[in-house]
Amino acid sequence: MMSDKRNILVLGSGGREHALSWKIAQSPLLGSLYCAPGNGGMAEIAENLALDMADHQAVITFCQEKAIDLVIIGPEAPLVAGLADDLTAAGIAAFGPGKIAAQLEGSKGYTKDLCAEADIPTAAYGRFDNACAALEYLDSQSAPIVVKADGLAAGKGVIIAEDMKTARDAVEEIFDGAFGDAGAELVIEEFMTGEEASFFVLCDGENALPLATAQDHKRVGDGDTGPNTGGMGAYSPASIMTPALIDTAMEKIIHPTLAAMARRGAPYRGVLYAGLMLTDDGPKLVEYNARFGDPECQVLMMRLKSDIVPVLEASASGSVAEMTLDWHDEIAMTVVMAAAGYPGAYEKGSTIGLEAVGDDIMVFHAGTARAEDGTISATGGRVLNVTARGKTVAQAQASAYAGVDKIDWPQGFCRRDIGYREIEREME
Ligand code: AMP
Ligand code: GLY
């Protein structure tokens, strides 16, 4: 059995991992908190380490040396590489799915086949491992249509083709290696219309505990213009995901997925992030991720009142069936500040002044480093997540941007309209 206090290791270096670490650091159950590699914000609440996540034995050895009770695996790559299985086999509890279960994110074709098998609502599709068959399938389809590289492509492997030439070009490019190994196979999908929402559930292999809904803003520019990014801001909850829609999503999408994974001998543990399209025919699955969203996690952690450690532990190695969570009723919003040029080329090394930001605002760090004298500098594309709560979306937004305006970082920028759709709805 575990001792009273848990030593916890968080793997990752984004705003997501800072938000998780921040929440974990508030737990009375916490012993020591370690982060690898961590960032400038995590350095203030944990010990940052230079551990190579790809070296599973090095992670296991570290956990044994430091008597780590629980490892939180933040990003998808180590999950798809089977780190959770290797930790579990070494007797170390790991939060996140094993290698096969992580295929729900690691292979779009795997997920589409699972949806077909379990009758889960999603776009009609074809799955191909050669251009000839894919192009022949396209001849029977019409635009708009969606072409997706099968594997992990850092969010870039999806082409929404407005015409058939673009779709055919996408097929050729993917099989010509535009996305490397991730494009050894591809999926062609019917284009779905509706509004998108993210839905997060915590799973223990059998049961699912609904966490919360959120909406992200993927485009870099105001009004959803410009290239896609990892996400420029988010809020939670998403009012468009009504309680009735949540029930439908649990019944038609989440539960059948968990049952199908269990039947396949790969029960799903960890957080399951469903990207949903709210169509006229009800919610349909766009994609699964095997991890928390970034920046969605930041708003979830800002709203969560309960201690997170018991539920992470239950998901990793126990049961979430009897668990409940308390949430702040308020809306949480996070605004991402990125380095000028992102998602293209950007400069690193500029200094960030955070001293003027008040206690009501939480600034989660992403690409930052902290020098010994406490100076924070930018080291990545997405750099800060300025996060606030409010009674209304408009109030949360006003607070978040008031926080942004107190940050002294001329080399950074942000979208100025995070939550605009929700604020329009709120005003109706
Ligand atoms: P994914 O990486 O699968 O989430 O795709 C990235 C984005 O492409 C999604 O968030 C949607 O905005 C869009 N998308 C993906 N698949 C479809 C689809 N079948 N119909 C419409 N939009 C889609
Ligand atoms: N914010 C989108 C994602 O984490 O995939």
Image (tube, rainbow, N blue to C red):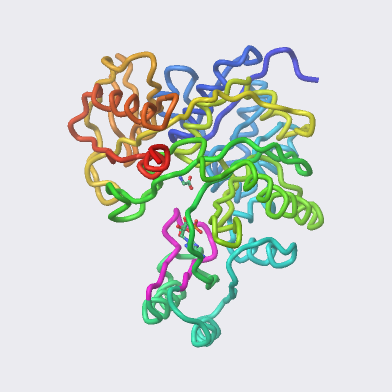
Which residues, given as a range, are shown in magenta?
145-162
Query: Against 166, is 332 above or below?
Result: above
Q: Residue at x 61, y 16 (%)?
A: 27
Q: Residue furthest left?
A: 410
Q: Quadrant of residue 176?
A: bottom left
Residue ID at (33%, 34%): 383
Foreground pick, 284 / 15: 284
Query: Vertically, is 375 above or below 143?
Result: above
Vertical position of residue 99 compared to residue 156: above or below: above
Residue 83 visible in the displayed image: no
Choose between 51 and 299: the one closer to the eye.
299
Side of 115 relative to 384 (left or right): right
Above or below, 3 relative to 297: above
Q: Is residue 51 visible?
A: yes
Residue 421 picture quarter: top left
Relative image position of residue 360 (x, y in whole percent): 39, 16
The residue depicted at 32 percent of the width and 52 percent of the height is 224
Image coords of residue 256 (percent x, y): 75, 54
Total number of numbered discs in the rendering: 0
